[in-house]
Amino acid sequence: MSGATIVPGSKVSMHFAIKMDNGDVVDSTFERTPAEFALGDGNLLPGFEEFLLGLNNGDHKEFDIPPEKGFGQPNPQNVQEMKRSVFPVDMPVAPGLMVSFADAQGAELPGVISKAEGDWVTVDFNHPLAGKTLKFEVQILEVSNAD
């Protein structure tokens, strides 16, 4: 059924943009192929999905997503002090540089250097959008629900 209202499990085709408060675009599909997913399949954060509930084919809306519904608040325990010696000698260690380490399970753990002084480097492993209020723009192209 096409033109249905978005409910849990709906298959949705939509364009979206995630923007910072100042208007800078973090990600957008408006100039690319639309996003397609089933609501609740894990492709979108639950805090983003809840704003889609009740929307219909053709709706074009913008929502403010507070940190608690987006990428959360920064966790001070995710900021680590590390010895300069753990970084490659030829790496230009400087604030703003993205680095990657392996966690205990071998998964990639990206972080951003926030400070480098003497023998110590501070790396922030929080998501870069943690603590930020985001604008979520959506244009619903098609909704289908199981009959």
Image: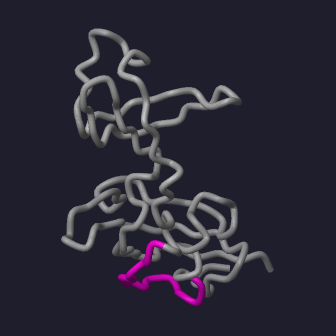
Magenta segment: 53-67
Q: Residue at x 43, y 78 (%)?
A: 66
Whether residue 58 appears in magenta in the rendering, the answer is yes
Q: Furthest residue to the top?
A: 89
Residue 27: % across, % down: 34, 57
Tell me where residue 65 sits by quadrant.
Answer: bottom left
**From the viewer's perspective, is residue 140 above or below residue 36?**
below
Colour approach in the figure: one colour
Residue 106: % across, % down: 65, 26
**From the viewer's perspective, is residue 120 above or below residue 11?**
above
Which is more toward the observer, 108 or 122? 122
Q: Residue at x 39, y 59 (%)?
A: 129
**Quadrant in which the N terminus appears:** bottom right
* Residue 27 placement, left or right of 56: left
**From the viewer's perspective, is residue 131 above or below residue 95?**
below
Q: Residue at x 31, y 9 (%)?
A: 89
